[in-house]
Amino acid sequence: MRLPPIHVNTPVWGTAYTQCFLDIALASLLAPSNLPSLNRDGGHVLHVMTTDADREMIEQSTTWRHAQEVIDCRIEVIAANVLRIQQPHLTMSACHRKAIAFADRCGAAIMLYNPDIVLADGAMHTLVRLLAEGKRAIQVVGLRLPKEEVTALLHQNHRGADGTSIVVSPRELMAIAMTNLHPLTMMHHYDAPNLDLMPQEIFWRVANEGLVARCFHIHPILVYPRVLNAPFTTTVDDDYLRAACPDPADEYVIADSDLLCLCELSGLHRSLIGLRRSENDVDIARWAAVHARPHHFEHFCRRILLHSNGAKGAEWDAACARSDAAVARILKHVVELRAGSA
């Protein structure tokens, strides 16, 4: 397959998010085996959608000037009527629709890259390889980490030789993650009885080495659509991917963090209310019976291993077995719940 150009799209607005984009998200994109590894003449584009005020901040930054040296950079101002929505997820989706339309006109794959991501070095190599193998819908799980603490660690220990980029390997990033998990990430832990549960992603911890993940929702990091201008109703990680790539054979879920590792950074003030935990996983089954679509259940049946030092040994085998047993119970409950409501 002839490789398409890649459009890296980031909608970002507000001083805090714009600063995080410049200091971390864009800086980690500039690691040697990420954007700089792409062919400068391959039609690749960094497409940032922002406000007039934030545009000035971006254009004056050293990181942005560095990016302009390695890839074609495009800044598009978000329309005032879109910003007036005042619901961040809807604004983000409106930006994604416009960026997808632009990428579709260019015959490009689109990388849906949030402004609060730190991306391990080598991610672009993996994405290009998977595109070359014919994969069109590449998905990855990202852990949420506390922004202030992790930003300080990355700046202190992982500055690139150029003084601008952030260069962190997948295993180094997972080592940082396992000692700096955000409280919201702890709500995804299966064995956290004192916390509400966030069922979209469920984790089984293996000491400080990593996590076994079983996820209903997985972020589509890169999509090369078969269906152009595919409609989606809410966000790109809900129904866009299957609308753009209807054939499941086009999909690839990153099941080992060595291949591609990313984390999201959030302030510690960010909080959510989850589910009350109940015995025998009935709470998760009730949520899934209402909110999960068929492809979400397909994802949930897949083990994803996020690790800092390999994912082998008795502890990993035991965590995988516990996750298998929980998935079987949850799916059994879902079938019973749906049969009872028929």
Image: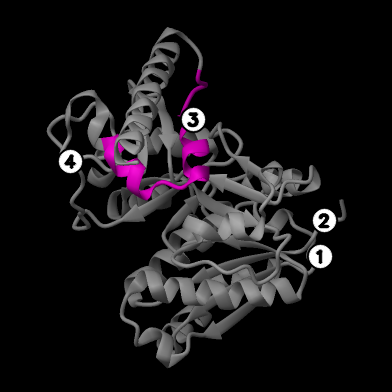
Q: Is residue 238 above or below residue 313?
A: below
- x then y, percent, for residue 169: 54, 39
Structure colour scheme: one colour
Label 3, residues with CA under 10 Å away: few <14, some 14-19, many ≥20: some
Mark in front: 4 vs 3: 3
Magenta part of the chain:
284-311
Q: Return the disc, 2 or 3, that comes first in the chain's sequence.
A: 2
Q: Estimate the spatial distance between the alpha carbons at disc 4 and disc 1, rounded to whole Å.
A: 47 Å
Q: Estimate the spatial distance between the alpha carbons at disc 2 and disc 3, rounded to whole Å.
A: 31 Å
Mark in front: 4 vs 2: 4
Q: Return the disc, 4 or 1, that comes first in the chain's sequence.
A: 1
Residue at x 31% of width, y 80% of height: 86
Mark in front: 4 vs 1: 4
Secondary structure at badge 4 equals loop
Residue farthest to the top, as pictured:
314
Q: Which residue is mark 1?
A: 42
In-image side of 106 versus 112 (left or right): right
- x then y, percent, for residue 161: 58, 52
Q: Which residue is mark 4?
A: 196
**Amino acid found under the numbered disc labelled 3:** Cys
Residue at x 17% of width, y 34% of height: 277
Secondary structure at badge 3 equals loop
Mark in front: 3 vs 1: 3
Which of the numbered marks, if any, corresponds to residue 301?
3
Q: Return the disc, 2 or 1, that comes first in the chain's sequence.
A: 2
Q: Is residue 258 above or below residue 309?
A: below
Answer whether labels 2 and 1 touch (C-beta < 8 Å).
yes
**Amino acid found under the numbered disc labelled 1:** Gly
**Residue 297 part of the magenta-drawn span:** yes
